[in-house]
Amino acid sequence: MPECYEKLKKIRIKHNYSYEDMSKKLGINKSFYWQLENKKRKLYYDMAIKIAAIFHVKPDKLFY
């Protein structure tokens, strides 16, 4: 699963979203999102679904 964090970072950058952009879209604070992307917090499936929806992909494609 570690490569999923790299995929997440790459797709975020590809869409020109900052940490702050993502946090606003997800309704969480910026540091919480940063911690998710940098493996400081566990990524739960419900959050994976929300993140995948932002990029219009299935969670499995992005995270597995």
Image: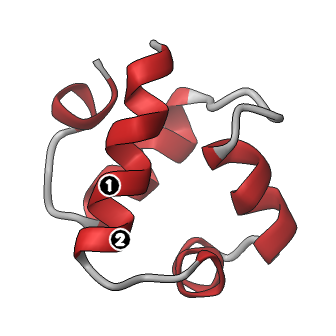
Image-quadrant location for residue 59: top left
Residue shown at 15% from the left, 62% from the top: 56
User: Within 10 Å of the Cα at label 2, are there few (<14), some (14-19), or many (20+) other Cα atoms?
Assistant: few
Answer above or below: position of 15 versus 45: below
Image location of residue 10, percent across then percent down: 32, 55
Image location of residue 7, percent across then percent down: 32, 40
Give the structural element (helix, strand or loop) at label 2: helix
Of the 4 image quadrants, the one containing the N terminus is: top left
Q: CA distance from mark 1 to mark 2?
A: 5 Å
Image-quadrant location for residue 23: bottom right
Image location of residue 45, percent across then percent down: 51, 29
Q: Amino acid at mark 2?
A: Ile
Q: Amino acid at mark 1?
A: Lys
Residue shown at 16% from the left, 31% from the top: 61
Q: How is the image coloured?
A: secondary structure
Q: How many marks?
A: 2
Query: Label 2 near label 1: C-beta < 8 Å?
Result: yes
Image location of residue 31, percent across then percent down: 85, 66
> Dot 2 corresponds to which residue?
13
> Dot 1 corresponds to which residue?
10
Answer above or below: position of 37 versus 43: below
Answer above or below: position of 14 versus 44: below
User: Within 10 Å of the Cα at label 1, are there few (<14), some (14-19), or many (20+) other Cα atoms?
Assistant: few
Residue shown at 53% from the left, 82% from the top: 18
Question: Does 16 sit left or right of 26 as displayed?
Answer: left
Give the structural element (helix, strand or loop) at label 1: helix
Of the 4 image quadrants, the one containing the C terminus is: top left
For the residue pair 45 and 2, the one nearer the viewer reads as 2
Question: Does 50 sit left or right of 18 as displayed?
Answer: left
